[in-house]
Image (spheres, helix red, strand yellow):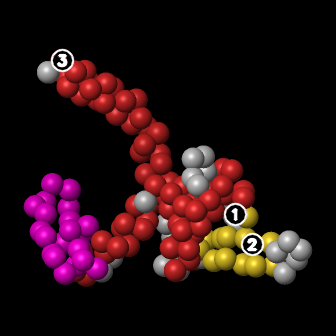
Amino acid sequence: MDCEHQQVWGRPMGAPLEHNVAGCAKVAPILQRIGDKWSILIVAMLSGGPRRFNELKRAIGGISQRMLTLSLRGLERDGLVTRTVTPTIPPRVDYALTPLGQSLEGPVSAISNWASAHHGAIEEARRRFDAARDDA
């Protein structure tokens, strides 16, 4: 992490949070990219190796062709994904994680495991919240 963020991200659990405006401004666009649900799913899919566009589209339910294209371009721009075109008829296009993208595999896996482990508790909290709102 950037030195400016160690007081935010590297702080001991329970320690007071210090806000560093300049540091936050630097990482906000990066967190926006890698925190996007489509980007997380793309990184997860590519962690198993290179994939073609239509393979990704089929595997990631609910993503439109346009959104997949935009997400892949953004990840490529940020240096997380490579796009390789093989000159065949039709052209073959493969997407793969770069070494920088591969460094996201651990955090993405941790988030996925956390979501799986706490899915039931979150669903129950949502039911209680919605019921309380309906009763009001």
Q: Give how far across and how far down residue 85 sits, in percent.
A: 76, 79
Label 1 secondary element? helix
In this rendering, position of residue 48 left or right of residue 122:
right
Which residue is denoted by mark 3 in the rendering? 135
Residue type, numbered disc 3? Asp
Which residue is denoted by mark 2 in the rendering? 93
In this rendering, position of residue 90 left or right of residue 44:
right
* Residue at 43%, 65% in the rendered image: 34
Q: Which image quarter is the C terminus in? A: top left
Q: Inspect the magenta stretch and tell me whether residue 98 lies in it.
A: no
Give, as a single range, the part of the protein colored magenta.
6-26
The answer to whether 88 is drawn above or below residue 52 in the figure is below
Q: Earlier in the sequence, mark 1 or mark 2?
A: 1
Residue type, numbered disc 2? Val
Q: Inspect the magenta stretch and tell me whether residue 18 lies in it.
A: yes
Spatial CA distance of label 3 from label 2 is 53 Å
Which residue is denoted by mark 1 in the rendering? 53
The answer to whether 126 is drawn above or below residue 7 in the figure is above
Label 2 secondary element? strand
